[in-house]
Structures are given as structure tokens and as C-alpha cells.
Amino acid sequence: MSPSSAGADARFALRPDAARREVDGAYFFVTADRGMHRVAVASGVAIVRALAEQPRTVDDLVGELAHRFDAEEATIRAETERFLRMLLEKQIVEVRA
């Protein structure tokens, strides 16, 4: 499933079975399949922090990132969807209806 095919109301959340730790501004994850993953890019860290607070829609995330980063909204949306797709593939996030 991709973020764009999940629907506008779909909320993304960190999976409870993915252990995470924030160290020096980066996030480290260990997933259920024993995969180890690192998120250190500022926009990725901002997305993970937002999802750690509560589930968010793509629109929620794009709105938050638009206030923090100087980029076109279309670019932010495309990069956010790409990042969420990668997090889904790595079993770090899940889609909630």
C-alpha cells in the first residue's frame, strides 16, 4: 500500500512492535523482523516525532513540514509520501483507518 492509495483520511502511526530510541537527534528502530533502521535527515526526524505524538494524515504532516521547511508544498507532499512508503515497507509505520 502506498500513502496516496490509503486515502485522504488514512492516519499513519508508528508500529507498536517497532522499538525506537532517539539518540543525538536521530531515531533508531528495530523492527519485528529484527531489521535495524536509522532516520537522521531533519525532515524524516520531524515526521517520526510527529507520529510519535499521535497518528497523522499525510495532510497533517505536510502542513507541519510546510511551516518548518522552505520548499514548495508539492515537493513536501511528494517527499512525505515517499518517506512514508519507505517506513511502511520497513514495518516502522502502519496505516490506521
Image (tube, rainbow, N blue to C red):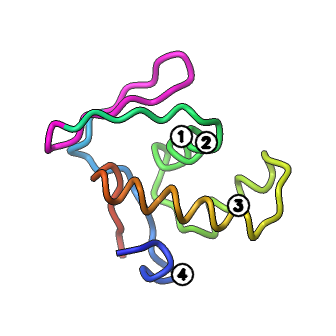
The span from disc 3 to disc 1 (Cα, nearest Å) is 16 Å
Residue ID at (41%, 56%): 86
Where disc 4 sits, the SS reads loop
The span from disc 1 to disc 2 (Cα, nearest Å) is 5 Å
Where disc 1 sits, the SS reads helix
The span from disc 2 to disc 3 (Cα, nearest Å) is 12 Å
The span from disc 4 to disc 3 (Cα, nearest Å) is 16 Å
Mark 4 is on which residue type?
Ala
- Asked if residue 17 is among those painted magenta in the image, a careful observer would answer no
Which stretch appears magenta?
20-34
* Residue wearing tag 2: 46
- Looking at the image, do the residues carrying marks 2 and 3 touch, with CB atoms under 8 Å apart? no
* Residue wearing tag 1: 49
- Looking at the image, do the residues carrying marks 1 and 2 touch, with CB atoms under 8 Å apart? yes
The relative height of residue 5 versus residue 66 in the rendered view (above or below) is below
Packing grade of label 1 (10 A; few <14, some 14-19, many >=20) is some
The relative height of residue 41 versus residue 5 in the rendered view (above or below) is above
- Asked if residue 33 is among those painted magenta in the image, a careful observer would answer yes
